[in-house]
Image: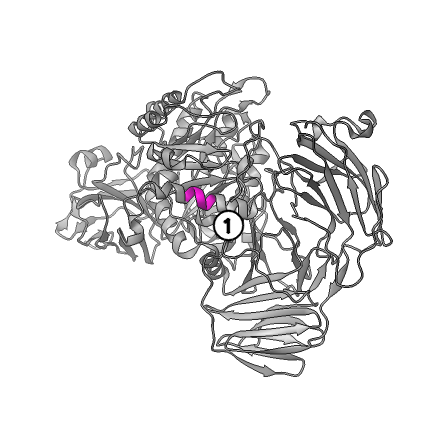
Amino acid sequence: MRLHRPLPRPRPRLRPAALAVALSSVTALAGPALPARAAAPGAAVLDQGHQSVTWQSPQYAKGTLGDAASCPPAAQDPGGAVCDHFDLTVNVPAGYWDDNPEGGVPVSVRWQNQTDDFDLYIYDAAGKQVASSAGTADPEATVIPKASGTYRVLVVPYDVHGGSYTGTAYLPQTADAGDLTSFGGSQGSYDITAGPLKAKVDFLADDQLRLRAAPDGVLTDPAGSTIIRKQPEPQRDTSTFDAGAYYGIRSKDLVLRVYKHPLRFGLYKADGSALWQEDAPLRWSTGGLRQSLVRGADEQFFGGGEQNGSFSHRDKTIHVANSFDWNEGGWNNSQPFYVSTAGYGVFRNTFAPGIYDFGSPVRTGQQERRLDAYFFTGDVKSVIGRYTALVGRPFMPPVYGLEPGDSDCYLHNANRGERHTLDALKVADGYVANQMPLGWMLVNDGYGCGYENLAQTGQGLRKDHAQLGLWTQNGLPDQATEVKAGVRVRKLDVAWVGNGYDFALNACDQAKAGIEDSSDARGFVWLPVSWAGAQRCGVLWSGDQSLSWDYIRWQIPTYAGATMSGIAYNTGDVGSIYRRDPKMYARDLQWKAFLPAIMTMDGWAKDMTGKQQRDQQPWLDGEPYTSINRKYLQLKERLLPYMYTLSEEATRTGIGAVRPLALEYPNDPEALGPNAKYEFLAGPDFLVAPVYSDTSVRNGIHLPAGTWTDYWTGRTYQGPTTINGYSAPLDTLPLFVRGGAIVPMWPKGTLSWENRDRSELDYDLYPEAKGDSSYTLYEDDGVTRQFTAGSSATQRVDVHTNRAVTTVDVGASEGSYAGKPAERSYRFTVHGRPAPRLVVGDDGPLPRRDSAAALDAAGSGWYFDAATGVTEIRTPSQPTDDSFSLRLIHGGN
């Protein structure tokens, strides 16, 4: 991996949305070269007679170290002395962009010197920014979407030392695949040509296939093994047949149709039902290629990685590219993958940007003249599983990674005055003093903020049960030494990984491996830009935002939607980075307590007036906010056995904890409606409906089919239903539990995984009135990689209910790991059932206690709380390797 030098950029440097197309040159279609016209100084036209243009900038002795706001208007900048100004007029017929793979005019600037850095911004005639590319890539490149009219191209010499650039823009021309000219192959691999176009189909295990095509006849694989570490096994048991209009390639469960006039493809089940069908041939342009598919009447689409503010995409166009738009509509952690409810999904094996239009027809294309697509079949969950099996399943985090994190710059902090790295320990002590969990801390910021006394800082943090972490700006040259000093968390930021694509993916893999190569710990890495495969190595976060109610609102579908691309850990800063408001902070924290990974970002926030510096720790606003924040952080800590088990599930299935309702309830039409958009499931059992406006009443809470219990009041609802007028004062997050849920919890008062009471495990039970439910708990040592060698344990709990008896069967904990308790007591909280007459264990009836306090004092027995309708049971200590049963007897004499 090529490492960028550290740049003196302010922290953080916001990057507007960009479709960063890596255009090193203008590649013409087969046939005569595109006509070109030399640009008049400062202006050019692209039309049918002038299809490409280049221009040369002035030489710049130095840069601006700023963004577009650093540039004076063109009239005040004669000759482009400060920034370069160029007017580009695009004159194309109506409908020109309707089916063009590139979707607009590509514009790029190539630097004269590799050490320079030019940034590119494009504005329409009204002065609205329509495209940009402001990373550290050479060339900087973007696309003016559906360009028509005159645009102002502004190039900022951000960090330049006596250099210039060459600008390029072109009007993409298109061509389509023609008639089939040859077809052949066997044993799962087939070669197809249509004139100069060459295609190859490979049938793979688990009902997958790979389709490659190249208009120039040369099949390449630029991604190599960077995304896909190991190719799936071939499926050789295939055969072909000639159906007249098409050739068929048949496997056990699938038939790929290869149409002859013109060449088109369609994938069908063995019974003849369509999974997908091309409605038009493959089309390519100067620098792109698209596939066009028939859209089903009710077909829905998910995926695309992190798409800020969205989780379902029918009738929408999404961008799949490197981006620095941290706000609603951005796509900085996008992935070239989508899944359809028609029974298929597709991954584009590429590092090229793309645009996916889920209208009718469905048109998906990448900014490269090749197709390399893996198609998966099955329901949505199966497709996500097969996709992540290909690019990398979500990593297993250390248990402290599921606890809250805290981040700040201590040494040389321009916002806070001179401090020292050891000052971080005072903040960690604050979490302890305020009885709030803290799993890890980032104690530096690479943007001018280094560190000192690293080993001593790590040792001090560990006394508070927190792990040491570092940000990085310019690579990992000292990672081995830092890990030996105690670093267990690594955050990668845009100054290093801002180029995205393979650069970010390699950095993520490198950072995770660096922690693991020098310790027995699990690598725990965060990054704000990424690509397909990043789920195997990192937590993705949606970048730097300012606090507002809208900020809270749009993040809800964002993180649930990321799960539909196998991203198990996607999150945003609690309370944002730039603003602090007590009420909005509390509302943001309470729902993010149900995300697996969260952190606060300190050191840059101000109050809502923008005048007073504010930090972001959860106790700083005083009461009632401190108590509210403590309540949810402690609940998050208690629920770690539940969330940790979901993390292990993600390593096997690719399905993360934070889920849109449509994933678990695909037959519920309201799961795709406007109400369900702003709620999510934490695992299968918790429905979270955040409050995202300044109100104490939550409307439009959609509950799917089944019984749902209000976590706070115990009131039950029968779904499907919609709740309006739900009372949600500031301390209340609307939270519902699925009927049949069995939820493992650590004991009340737990503040850290490390010093928790291992002699007790709690289960929160929500039995249905009649029926069976089960749950399997996963446990390991929480911090090392010994689980990969089988050092772990599972314990199954079954609940059977009828009118007279509720039976709880607790299986033996099967397996072993370092630190596994030999025995423990269990506390069961049983909701929604009438008071039992007796509670009977394997050794006979348990004693009934008069109060919860009496139950705690006695250490075992049971108590019924008439006010809540909850039965609490506490067992004597039980060997973990033994099974046991409890019966709550409600009827009889």
| For residue 636, above or below residue 51 | above
The chief SS type of the magenta part is helix
> The residue tagged with tag 1: helix, strand or loop?
loop
Q: Is residue 665 left or right of residue 873?
A: right
Q: Is residue 122 left or right of residue 648?
A: right
Q: Is residue 729 visible?
A: no
What is the quadrant of residue 362 in the picture?
A: bottom right
Q: Is residue 293 left or right of residue 432?
A: right
> Which residue is disc 1 drawn over?
660
Please tell me whether residue 510 belongs to the stretch shown in magenta: yes
Residue 424: image x %, image y %? 39, 23
What is the quadrant of residue 152 in the picture?
A: top right
The amino acid type of the residue labelled 1 equals Pro
Q: Residue at x 68, y 28 (%)?
A: 63
Residue 132: image x %, image y %? 69, 40
Residue 413: image x %, image y %? 49, 21
Residue 722: image x %, image y %? 52, 48
Residue farthest toward the left in the current orientation of the protein = 843
What is the quadrant of residue 552 in the picture?
A: top right
Q: Residue at x 33, y 52 (%)?
A: 767
Q: Is residue 64 left or right of residue 610?
A: right
Mark 1 crowd level (few <14, some 14–19, many ≥20, 10 Å Cα): many
Please tell me whether residue 627 belongs to the stretch shown in magenta: no
Q: Is residue 409 visible?
A: yes
The colour scheme used to paint the residues is: one colour
Q: Which residues are magenta?
A: 508-512
